[in-house]
Image (cartoon, rainbow, N blue to C red):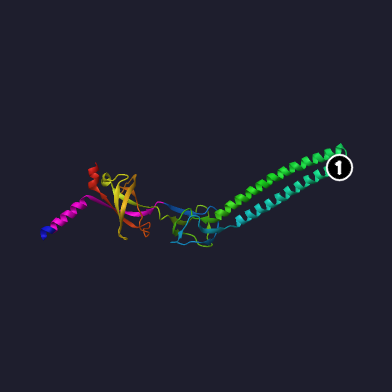
């Protein structure tokens, strides 16, 4: 019985000798830092930490007194230019009607018609200038509409909110971090490999992935080897992509990677 136990232990140690076990952490390959493009106060927050969102969902809204002033100015400018264009168009129509009446009644001399033509040319020039102002006002309205979109901060992709640094009433400025959005459909594992074990790792190599807390095992592939050693620990980082077959796998989870040393040596 004692000999059998020793033989069993020897077999296990032999098998483990052909495997290299490395610990790692589940990371999202698509993590977004959400901020604002316009300064203002947080008006409303639609999602909280842990909530799942879809692409184009409005995460939070901003209100800005500066924007309100800008919008009112743009609306007023557009209204004024429309009035100017309508006024000059009406004036041109009146001049043309007046010329037709004079011709129909045989009234007026060449000087009268020449004066009407000069007046029509002046009004047409003013109409062209007013039309240019109207085009500028219309463009300004489009710019204001773009800013309106900035005041509603939307999710760039589907994911889960893992961090929120704002509350209703807070002042927010461009570049300020408001939320962190993590895509759960693009997960990978980051692990540190000792310099002495780098000879067992190749890009594209298949390895065994184990997430102990869930009892989940699957196959992974070495996506990349970061060619920058940690000068203190003398380790290199490897990034492993894997099949996410469990909806409870989240970033930050502990993972084990088992590398088959024996098959690697044979391939060499």
Q: Measured from the top left, where is residue 221 in percent x and y?
A: 32, 48
Is residue 231 located in the magenta-colored stretch of the structure?
no
Is residue 18 located in the magenta-colored stretch of the structure?
yes
Q: Is residue 237 left or right of residue 81?
A: left
Quadrant for residue 151, please give it: bottom right
Q: Measured from the top left, where is residue 34 in percent x and y?
A: 48, 54
- The number of discs equals 1
The stretch in magenta equals 5-29
The residue positioned 14% from the left and 59% from the top of the image is 5
Q: Is residue 192 above or below residue 51?
A: above
Looking at the image, the residue that sits furthest to the front is 104
> Can residue 134 be seen here?
yes
Looking at the figure, which quarter contains the N terminus? bottom left
Q: Measured from the top left, where is residue 180 in percent x and y?
A: 45, 56
The residue positioned 18% from the left and 52% from the top of the image is 14
Q: Is residue 41 above or below residue 202?
A: below
Quadrant for residue 204, please give it: top left
Q: Is residue 132 left or right of residue 211?
A: right
Mark 1 Cα shell of 10 Å, populated few (<14), some (14-19), many (≥20): few
Looking at the figure, which quarter contains the C terminus? top left
Query: What secondary structure is marked by label 1?
Result: helix
Quadrant for residue 181, please give it: bottom left
Q: Measured from the top left, where is residue 49 in percent x and y?
A: 44, 61
Residue situated in front as seen by the camera: 180 or 187: 187
The residue positioned 74% from the left and 49% from the top of the image is 86
Q: Which residue is mark 1?
A: 104
Q: Is residue 64 left or right of residue 79?
A: left
> Can residue 233 be seen here?
no
């Amino acid at each position: 019985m004692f000999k059998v136990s020793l033989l069993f232990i020897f077999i296990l140690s032999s098998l483990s000798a052909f495997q290299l076990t490395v610990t790692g952490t589940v990371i999202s390959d698509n993590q977004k830092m959400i901020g604002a493009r316009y300064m203002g106060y947080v008006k409303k927050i639609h999602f909280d930490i842990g909530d799942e969102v879809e692409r184009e969902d409005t995460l939070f809204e901003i209100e800005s007194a500066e924007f309100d002033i800008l919008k009112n100015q743009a609306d007023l400018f557009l209204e004024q230019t429309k009035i100017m264009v309508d006024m000059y168009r009406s004036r041109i129509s009146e001049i043309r009607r007046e010329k037709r009446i004079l011709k129909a009644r045989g009234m007026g001399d060449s000087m009268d018609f020449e004066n009407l033509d000069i007046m029509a040319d002046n009004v047409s020039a003013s109409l062209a200038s007013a039309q240019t102002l109207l085009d500028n006002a219309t463009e300004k309205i489009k710019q204001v509409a773009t800013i309106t979109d900035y005041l509603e901060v939307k999710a760039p992709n589907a994911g889960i909110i893992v961090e929120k640094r704002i509350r209703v009433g807070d002042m927010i400025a461009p570049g300020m971090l408001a939320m962190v959005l993590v895509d759960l459909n693009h997960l990978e594992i980051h692990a540190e490999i000792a310099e002495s074990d780098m000879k067992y790792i190749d890009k594209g190599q298949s390895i065994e992935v184990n997430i102990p807390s869930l009892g989940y095992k699957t196959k992974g592939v070495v996506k990349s080897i970061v060619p920058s050693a940690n000068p203190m620990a003398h380790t290199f980082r490897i990034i492993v992509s894997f099949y996410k077959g469990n909806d409870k796998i989240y970033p930050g989870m502990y993972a084990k990677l088992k590398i088959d040393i024996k098959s690697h040596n044979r391939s060499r």
